[in-house]
Image (tube, rainbow, N blue to C red):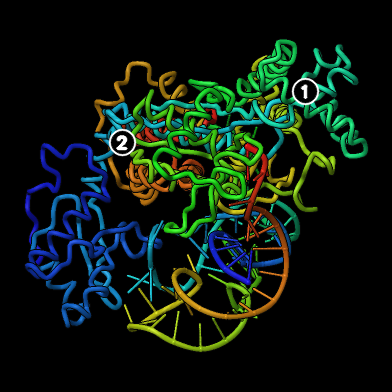
RNA sequence: GCCCCGGUAGCUCAGCUGGAUAGAGCAACGGACUUCUAAUCCGUAGGUCGCGCGUUCGAAUCGCGCCCGGGGUACCA
């Protein structure tokens, strides 16, 4: 009843399709053959990874859903689909189970062949889907004169992971750090600088000092109205191009950037552009004019606003009644400039959850202006402390630097114990990779949209589901590979076939094959945590394999096969961690 | 008031967009290092998936209504 054919699912022009795409195409064809013209285009006739291994490697749940429209028992539908075509080489068997699930088991021969294909591909079987497309990534974007705190790990870490992922997928990525370098805080800052600054502190800890004088100036403005008026005057002078104030403003930015840069360096984050809000100042008046000309902006309560009733959104203010511009204006001007200069296919904005409405408005106005670019607002839940939200005013802010220092020093203590023979300089390097990796991973392994509660325990975890666990798995493999070349210096690994015989080899192979699907899904939903989940799962299976299955001590042939599988796991871990911005030392 | 999130093991979180018996880590308890790195592995224990009703072959997942927490809601960003 089920006959094997020698045909492969993939065809020449569809190279490098993922296993999920291949199987889904096959299963759809099977259903369409069994029920010609009766399967709707948009019906989810596809295959998904099974949650439980006893149900095979992939499963198709379509038969149940089709039961009603086809007026047939789901098991009969599944039977008919399977009988309508022969099994491709990839599949060793396909079974119908329960109410009508189709469980698909991949053949060991195919798995071995697929691993070989992955091994020979420097992209590990991930095709370059973004070739020829440009995407602008807007992330991190800290405010000048304010220290980066633990909350910035979210925008920066998630943004950078999506940045790296898109680059790997072949997109031309323009990472733009849209600094908060313009706004009402500068009046207070200038006043604070003139009256309270400690120049030495400003050189030693620029941002900390800037923040201090800002807070002091802010407090004074609360109790002293004349102070507030003075600050306002200074702000106006700045906006009108007063030389002295302009020079101060530039200095604040330079000092802040210098400090941000050192943080970015430690985090391994680089930007293509540092265009703050001020970069777009010149465009603000003409943008409002444009909106007025197109009858989009109208005067209401003295302000220029765009009504968005059709979109069921509140009004968007593009010019305040005092003539000033606000962040909606800036974001629109920024968008227009980006479209003009880069003609992007997509722009991805990373901000916290509070700006959802703001971006809905911006996107709505952009759409009315006829600006066509795929705009995505990727938001993440605010980071909180157990006691609640943190804020400068409450004085319970944990600085990013402090977190990184703590992470590195804790990692260093562990390295000293577990690798006592390692030279100290190397121990410090490892501690850096491990510590920073731990901090990043703690955040990246969570669903971006969930509200996260910061705990030192979790942010600095060095065991369990953590970056060091993955780095450790990687380092073990690196060590195995070195030992192999030491013991068998003349051996040509690749001359030996990859064999999938042991149950754990099979489980590893299945996971390795899912790498591409995982990356595509992570990019589609803007969720680096899918990559983290995947890597952790892979590393877990590997650790079990490592602990329970001999390889250097196995007989020749088995040994070479296993070492090659190890090599693929290593490359996949390395690439995956790299996409998360996490380093993989060869020894830890 | 309206809108958007979230509520899953003692704690911190996953749960592949409706699938089969809800999973990890930490913490707890019991085992495994003269061996390929024990930052590891194996095992035990731990659940009314906030509550109720509904949709259907099937709901942690979708809809409605409550309860609790967070955020937003015309000139801050």
Residue A85 visible in the snapshot? yes
Specify the quadrant of the image occupied by residue A267. Answer: top right
Q: Nearer the viewer, residue B29 or A348?
A: A348
Q: Which residue is mark 1?
A: A234
Specify the quadrant of the image occupied by residue A223. Answer: top right
Q: Which residue is mark 2?
A: A126
* Count of all numbered marks drawn on residues in the image: 2
Left or right relative to A76: residue A439: right
Point 37% across, 16% down: residue: A489
State which mark lies toward you, 2 or 1: 1
Point 58% across, 54% down: residue: A450
- Dot 1 surroundings within 10 Å: few (below 14), some, or many (20 or more)? many
The image shows residue A357 at horizontal and vertical percentages of 54, 51
Question: Which residue lies most toward the right here?
Answer: A223
The quadrant of the rendering that contains the C terminus of chain A is top right
Specify the quadrant of the image occupied by residue A27. Answer: bottom left
The image shows residue A100 at horizontal and vertical percentages of 25, 74
Q: Which mark is residue A61?
A: none
Q: Nearer the viewer, residue B77 or A423?
A: B77
- Disc 2 to disc 1, C-alpha distance: 55 Å
The image shows residue B56 at horizontal and vertical percentages of 33, 83
Q: Nearer the viewer, residue B44 or B63?
A: B63
Residue A585 visible in the snapshot? no
- Dot 2 surroundings within 10 Å: few (below 14), some, or many (20 or more)? many
The answer to whether marks 2 and 1 mark residues whose Cβ atoms lie closer than 8 Å is no
Disc 1 on helix, strand or loop? helix
Left or right relative to A547: residue A394: right
Disc 2 on helix, strand or loop? loop
The image shows residue A93 at horizontal and vertical percentages of 20, 61
């Amino acid at each position: 009843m089920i006959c094997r054919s020698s045909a492969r699912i993939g065809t020449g022009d569809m190279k490098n399709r993922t296993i999920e795409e291949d199987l889904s195409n096959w299963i759809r064809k099977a259903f369409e053959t069994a029920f010609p013209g009766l399967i709707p285009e948009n019906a989810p006739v596809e295959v998904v990874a099974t949650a439980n291994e006893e149900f095979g490697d992939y499963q198709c749940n379509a038969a149940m859903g089709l039961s009603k429209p086809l007026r047939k028992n789901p098991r009969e539908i599944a039977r008919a689909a399977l009988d309508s075509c022969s099994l491709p080489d990839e599949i060793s068997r396909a079974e119908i189970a329960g109410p009508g699930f189709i469980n698909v088991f991949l053949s060991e021969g195919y798995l071995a062949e697929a691993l070989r294909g992955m091994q020979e591909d420097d992209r590990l079987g991930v095709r370059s889907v973004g070739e020829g497309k440009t995407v602008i990534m807007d992330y991190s974007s800290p405010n000048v004169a304010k220290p980066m705190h633990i909350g910035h790990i979210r925008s920066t870490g998630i943004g950078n992971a999506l940045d790296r992922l898109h680059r790997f997928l072949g997109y031309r990525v323009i990472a733009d750090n849209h600094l908060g370098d313009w706004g009402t805080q500068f009046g207070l800052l200038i006043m604070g600088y003139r009256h309270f600054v400690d120049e030495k502190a400003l050189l030693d800890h620029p941002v900390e000092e800037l923040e201090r004088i800002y807070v002091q100036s802010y407090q004074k403005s609360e109790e002293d109205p004349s102070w507030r008026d003075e600050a306002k005057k200074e702000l106006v002078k700045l906006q009108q191009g007063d030389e002295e104030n302009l020079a101060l403003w530039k200095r604040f930015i330079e000092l802040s950037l210098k400090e941000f840069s050192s943080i970015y360096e430690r985090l391994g984050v680089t930007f293509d552009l540092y265009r703050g809000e001020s970069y777009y100042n010149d465009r603000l008046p003409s943008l409002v004019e444009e909106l007025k000309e197109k009858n989009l902006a109208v005067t209401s309560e003295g302000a220029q606003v765009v009504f968005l009733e059709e979109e069921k959104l509140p009004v968007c203010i593009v010019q305040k009644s005092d003539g000033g511009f606000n962040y909606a204006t800036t974001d629109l001007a920024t968008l227009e400039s980006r479209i003009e200069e880069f003609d992007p296919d997509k722009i991805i904005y990373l901000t916290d959850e509070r700006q959802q409405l703001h971006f809905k408005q911006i996107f709505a106005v952009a759409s009315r202006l006829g600006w066509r670019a795929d705009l995505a607002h990727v938001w993440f839940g605010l980071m909180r402390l157990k006691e609640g939200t943190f804020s400068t005013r409450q004085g319970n802010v944990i600085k990013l630097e402090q977190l990184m220092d703590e992470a590195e020093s804790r990692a260093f203590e562990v390295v000293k114990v577990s690798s006592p023979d390692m030279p100290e300089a190397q121990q410090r390097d490892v501690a850096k990779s491990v510590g920073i990796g731990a901090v990043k991973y703690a955040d990246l392994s969570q669903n971006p949209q969930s509200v996260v509660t910061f705990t030192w325990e979790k942010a600095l975890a060095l065991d369990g589901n953590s970056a060091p666990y993955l780095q450790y798995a990687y380092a073990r493999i690196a060590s195995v590979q070195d030992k192999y070349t030491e013991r068998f210096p003349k051996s040509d690994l690749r001359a030996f076939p990859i064999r999938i015989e042991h149950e754990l080899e099979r489980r590893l192979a299945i996971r390795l094959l899912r790498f591409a699907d995982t990356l595509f899904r992570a990019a589609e939903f803007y969720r680096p945590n899918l990559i983290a989940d995947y890597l952790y799962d892979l590393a877990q299976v590997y650790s079990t394999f490592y602990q329970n299955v001999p390889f250097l001590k196995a007989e020749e042939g088995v040994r070479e096969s296993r070492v090659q599988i190890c090599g693929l796991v290593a490359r996949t871990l390395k690439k995956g961690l790299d996409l998360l911005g996490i380093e993989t030392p060869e020894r830890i």
